[in-house]
Amino acid sequence: MTDQALFRKILIANRGEIALRVLRACHDLGVPAVVAYSDADRESLAVQLADEAVCIGPAPVSKSYNNIPAIISAALVTGCDALHPGYGFLAENAYLADICQQVGVTFIGPRPEVIERMGNKAEARRVMRDAGVPLVPGSDGPVENLGAARQAARKIGYPIVIKAVAGGGGRGMRVARDDVELTRLLPVAQSEAESAFGDGAVYLERYLDRPRHIEVQILADNHGATLAVGDRDCSIQRRHQKLVEEAPAPNLPRRTRENLFRAAIKGAKAVRYTNAGTLEFLLDRDGHFYFMEMNTRIQVEHPVTELVTGIDLVAWQIRIAAGQRLTVSERDVEPHGHAIECRITAEDALADFAPGVGTVGAYIAPGGPGVRIDSHLYAGYAVPPFYDSLLAKVIVWGRDRDEAIARMERTLTEMAIVGVPNTTAFQRRLIGDEAFRRADVQTGFLIEHGDRILADLAAGAAARTGEREPRQDDR
Ligand code: MV4
């Protein structure tokens, strides 16, 4: 199977592990790639492994990775005919996708109108509702003032959650249990939304009690084919940052999964979605699921879906953008076994996850059967202080969930990152916790089990400090 006539050259407008992930897909497809980098990333692994690299500006993101003119210029001067935005930064910026179109560079993602529509969370709800996708009961569109909010809240039923129309990912969320709290929190949520997103509009939803976060990966080509590739459980989060993701979602009844996939395909078709995308759902304790939002990019956790389906999602993003037809069908993506991803960040779990920086002294990347490490680390790499704290994604595959957990424990035990505080030991404890083992994964996981996991981690650290050589302490 050859991939002719994909692109002449692709600009990778991102950094860190995802720049490397996209670069690897380009190389697997035989397409040369240019990595756009900031001053702070001159020494990055993606730059070192790229066919070409181009500096797009100083370290602050507003001057480099979020700088649309700099990125468009970089694509044009290097002769790129396509651009991959990765995740974060400008990945869901409809304006970038639009300018790309205007200057003849293919944006590897959905059309600008689709990015725009799904970026407005109230509009996304409306589209999905009209398509017959189940939604959390909520306001029809934004609530304009307190009177409208109180009226909507009474109809929805307390507790309710106030969410930013321009938000997503839980930022700026506020929960109100009654009229009094709503009255107090509505202006707080509005002004927060205004300062965070430049848009103070908010909408209301019924607040579900400790739901699971389940998402469905979609691939859709430019010829009308739409495929639900698989589901992931991403319930284990801390301050709306995902920590652990797995595929397929454990203990999901077959009928529920079928209905989820059907709803996701219906939703994606309703917006004439193209390329890779994800529909996020909440699953309540009665097994009902509700659409929450749609992400119009490749996601951090995409590898767990790749490991259980054998599909290269990033390669498919590129092929689809080049106009190729999806040649995989429902049968090809039947999940095989179980995959788990642990995000390793430069944070000190025992100091309330304080972010850290530093230079990686030594780095031991694990391997062996069923192990995949997506990381831009190397010994001697200086972690810049300007960007997000993701250091590595440790992804394992097993024939079943228990085997995947055992492999994850083994892998995190092998892993060593010296010189930068990191969450490897914390993740090792989390994965080993009995609540995780019995698949008690829901969005209250860390609230319910975090103290025990952290106490266990602290006890382990103290025991080792009392021991011989400080061998594992700074792992
Ligand atoms: C909710 C919810 C309960 N009810 N919406 C947080 C992340 C963002 N994508 C939406 N989030 C939530 N929305 C309603 N109507 C609970 C959360 C939530 C959550 C969701 C997924 C994973 C972890 C979470 C932790 C706290 C709250």
Image (spheres, rainbow, N blue to C red):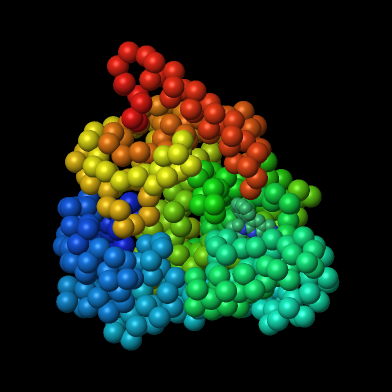
Q: Is residue 128 above or below residue 436?
A: below
Name the image quarter holding residue 15.
bottom left
From this viewpoint, is residue 422 visible?
Answer: yes
Q: Is residue 329 above or below residue 189?
A: above
Q: Nearer the viewer, residue 146 or 268?
A: 146
Q: How many marks?
A: 0
Tell which quarter ligand 1 is in: bottom right
Counting from the top left corner in percent of width and height, residue 94 is at 44, 78
Q: Residue at x 69, y 61 (%)?
A: 175
Q: Is residue 382 above or below residue 87?
A: above
Counting from the top left corner in percent of width and height, residue 336 is at 53, 41
Q: Residue furthest bottom?
A: 102
Q: Residue at x 41, y 63 (%)?
A: 88
Q: Is residue 21 above or below residue 226?
A: above
From this viewpoint, is residue 223 visible?
Answer: no
Q: Residue furthest top?
A: 468
Left or right, 158 with reference to 28: right
Q: Nearer the viewer, residue 442 or 98?
A: 442
Can you say which quadrant of the picture contains the C terminus? Answer: top left
Counting from the top left corner in percent of width and height, residue 250 is at 63, 41
Counting from the top left corner in percent of width and height, residue 289 is at 71, 57
Name the image quarter holding residue 464.
top left
